[in-house]
Amino acid sequence: MTQFTLNLIVIGLSFALYIGIAIWARAGSTAEFYAANRGVGPVTNGMATAADWMSAASFISMAGLIAFTGYDNSTYLMGWTGGYVLLALLLAPYLRKFGKFTVPEFIGDRFYSRSARIIGVVCLLIISITYVIGQMTGVGVTFSRYLEVSNSTGLWIGAALVFMYAVLGGMKGITYTQVAQYIVLITAYTIPAVFISLQLTGNFLPQLGLFSTHDASGMAFLAKLDDLVTDLGFRSYTGHHNSTLDMVLFTLALMIGTAGLPHVIIRFFTVPKVSDARKSAGWALVFIALLYTVAPAVGSMARFNLTATMWPGAQTGDTFSQPAVSLEAIETAPELQWMRNWQVTGLLAWEDKNGDGLIQYYNDRVEPTGELAQVIQDQGLVGNELTTVNNDIMVLANPEIANLPGWVIAIVAAGGLAAALSTAAGLLLAISGAVSHDLIKGTLAPNISERTELLVARISMAFSILVATLLGLNPPGFAAQTVALAFGLAASSIFPVLMMGIFVKRINKHGAIWGMIAGMATTIIYIFVYKGWFFIAGTNMLPDTPDAWLFGISPASFGVIGALINFIVAFLVSNMTEETPAEVQELVESIRVPRGAGAAVLH
């Protein structure tokens, strides 16, 4: 059986499972569509939340970013997991006790303002659409390789699948589909990591293998990796090289952005009781940790395998003890079939610039020193010849680079799709709820029937899928980079208003409205100055480089500054305007004080 056929079978079976679950759990009411009728148990909801949370950025892109940067990109691990703790402790139980369906609905009721609710909808749409672009990017990368289609064709296939189970099932169908997707993605992430850890270190636990001895050289694995990448002119893998200020701000942006993500927050509206929201958070952390503790090992071992493929001498002896991989070997050797496979996608490319029949891989962006400088002079090298290595291929290609069995490669393909599709479905549901429940039912047409609202919800979700797919055809960066921008937007808009809404009675509708506008607007402007308007290449006003950033703060880190602006504006405006009404203050008190923390009243 060919690898393509095996991929098709495994991916096809997983798709059949998702669609079957959606049909079985089809939503028949708005309560089922928005919140699964509040009947999801803590363990089930924890697993579904983990799948919703661990997106294409976590599965596909995060380890790739760690692979090529090392320690500095551990910020993704620290920020995302730390943010989930904030969400679990500071927001989820209180929002569940409030008993609403959506985040904008809480904002509108807490700040007694239809305008605040509409601004909440706008913020949610901007965040969720930016986030879902990253998921569709991951879908396109995975499909383009494993179904041997173009990136754009892969995007449309993924969009069709999400349409079939998300539009049909709503939150009820998505919840149980995400449980299945979690099982698929954690299996797909763990199995190849175990195989590769055994190959390189002899330790079957990747978490321990990362700190074990590299079998072939007898050196500590991370020390061997450091030697290898520095030999080739790259920065050390375990060292800290970037701005400490930006690293701290980026970690904080991911943390508070996580706590403000609407599609994760609404998962806590699906449980029967407030206490179940806390239990769900605990279970979700357990399920998330199963992948996040493996990710550093996956990233480092992927970087080692890629580099050792290009310089075979790196496996045991010195990096340059054997010639670089030859063009002939790339074209004919079975163990290098993976390079030919990924070349077709356009995500991996090489060029023999000096015509010596070898493909030399090294860092040509800095002045070479030591042995590398001598090799460049002796061999007449004129530049790095591995011209394109997309970060997003590393996790997906890792099993192929390590020559693992075909069934492992097929499972990884299914896992990458499960991660992207599970989060995409959650985001699309958040978008759908904001449009149908908050904008249409809550503002424009409050008298529509439940049946009409359900139809509007499904239509808005279908339209959102179309928009997300079109934007995914030209994303602004790698999956994790695109997602990081969404976290910055959530940090600057949703997180502050939720925190103040729960814990600060004095913040009134004027403060909330102007705080959200100021935080979101400044963050969007800063991002667009360096990334370009609507992410169109060449439209950025300033170069997206550390030298050009304001005080060295990257666009992905600016969400923290946006959040501070949000808080400051909200406090200033609230103190210059009237007091919050007494009934609203009583509402805030009832949310914070856990009286009768049993079943909340359905609204």
Image (cartoon, helix red, strand yellow):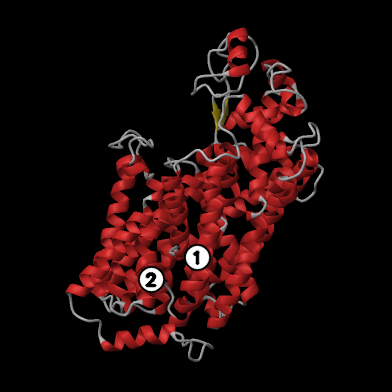
Report the residue marked by disc 2: 498
Residue sitting at 57 percent across and 33 percent down?
345
- Which quarter of the figure has residue 100? bottom left
Q: Identity of the amino acid at label 2?
A: Leu
> Between 159 and 57, which is closer to the camera in this rendering?
57
Image-quadrant location for residue 36: bottom right
* Placement of the N terminus among the 4 image quadrants: top right
What residue sits 53% from the left and 79% below the top?
Answer: 37
Q: Amino acid at mark 1?
A: Val
Q: Earlier in the sequence, mark 1 or mark 2?
A: 1
Identity of the residue furthest to the bottom in this view: 596
Q: Disc 1 and disc 2: Cα gap in Å?
A: 14 Å
Q: Measured from the top left, where is residue 335 in percent x and y? A: 75, 28
Which disc, if any, is residue 399?
none
Q: Position of residue 330 (x, y in %)?
A: 69, 21
Within 10 Å of disc 1 (Cα), the crowding (few <14, some 14-19, many 20+) is many
Residue at image position (56%, 76%) is 278
Q: What residue is shown with label 1?
A: 264
